[in-house]
Image (cartoon, helix red, strand yellow):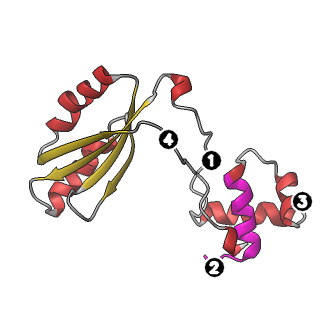
Amino acid sequence: MDLDRTDYRILHHVQNNARISNVELAEAVGLSPSPCLRRVKALEEAGVIKRYAGIVDAGAVGLPISIFINVSLERQERTHLEDFEGSIRSNPEVMECYLMTGSSDYLVRIVVPDLQAYERFLADKLTRIPGVANIQSSFALKQVVYNTELPLQERI
């Protein structure tokens, strides 16, 4: 899908407030409501807008600990990568997982309520995934920046 400046303006506003009404969005981007809604639907159908979500404060709901885990596999064959990815997806603690270049194969971010929950995650879940060779964890002390909006300002 070829995006124009109006599409990028729509994306900017939707990223900042997914609950914005179509009338408010249309006014913000300089369209009438019908064409604005058509554009939003086209962005959704093309997969540019994947879903709408509310951002919940992890600490406020009892999940104050964020841990980044570097995982290395015994072998980097396709089947081992696919097996790991399938297994890691099934854990609700996992917020993000990336296949990486460098010294480890994956970077995983989890959130847990306490150290005991982290220990259970490690012992009962992560170390039981076949092919995991090495695990190195880093605990986040403080969240300095957390953005959910992609930097589209230069395209607006």
- The residue pinned by badge 1 equals 52
Q: Decide: few, some or many residues near mark 1? Use Cα within 10 Å; few <14, some 14-19, many ≥20.
A: few
Residue behind mark 2: 2
Q: Main secondary structure of the magenta part?
A: helix
The earlier-in-sequence mark between 3 and 1 is 3
- Nearest to the observer: residue 125 or residue 65: 65
Examine the image and state in which quarter residue 33 appears: bottom right
Q: Residues within 10 Å of mark 2 (few under 14, many from 20)?
A: few
Residue contact between numbered discs 2 and 1, judged by CB atoms under 8 Å: no
Q: Secondary structure at mark 4?
A: loop
**Distance in Å between CA atoms under marks 3 and 4:** 34 Å
Q: Secondary structure at mark 1?
A: loop
Q: Considering the numbered disc 3 on the image, is that residue within a helix, a strand or a loop? A: helix
Q: Residues within 10 Å of mark 3 (few under 14, many from 20)?
A: few
* In the image, residue 22 lies in the stretch drawn in magenta: no
Quadrant for the N terminus in the image: bottom right
User: Is 87 placed above or below 39 here?
Assistant: above
Where does label 3 land, which residue?
27
Earlier in the chain: of badge 4 and badge 1, it is 1
Residue 90: percent from left, percent from top: 32, 39
**Which stretch did the figure color magenta?**
1-15
Is residue 151 or residue 83 the one in the foreground?
151
- In the image, residue 84 above or below residue 40: above
Q: Which residue is mark 4?
A: 143
Image quarter (top left, top right, bottom left or bottom right) of the C terminus:
bottom right
In reply to whether residue 6 is colored magenta, the answer given is yes
Which amino acid lies under the numbered mark 4 shown in the image of this protein? Gln
Describe the element under mark 2 as helix, strand or loop.
loop
Kind of residue at disc 3: Glu
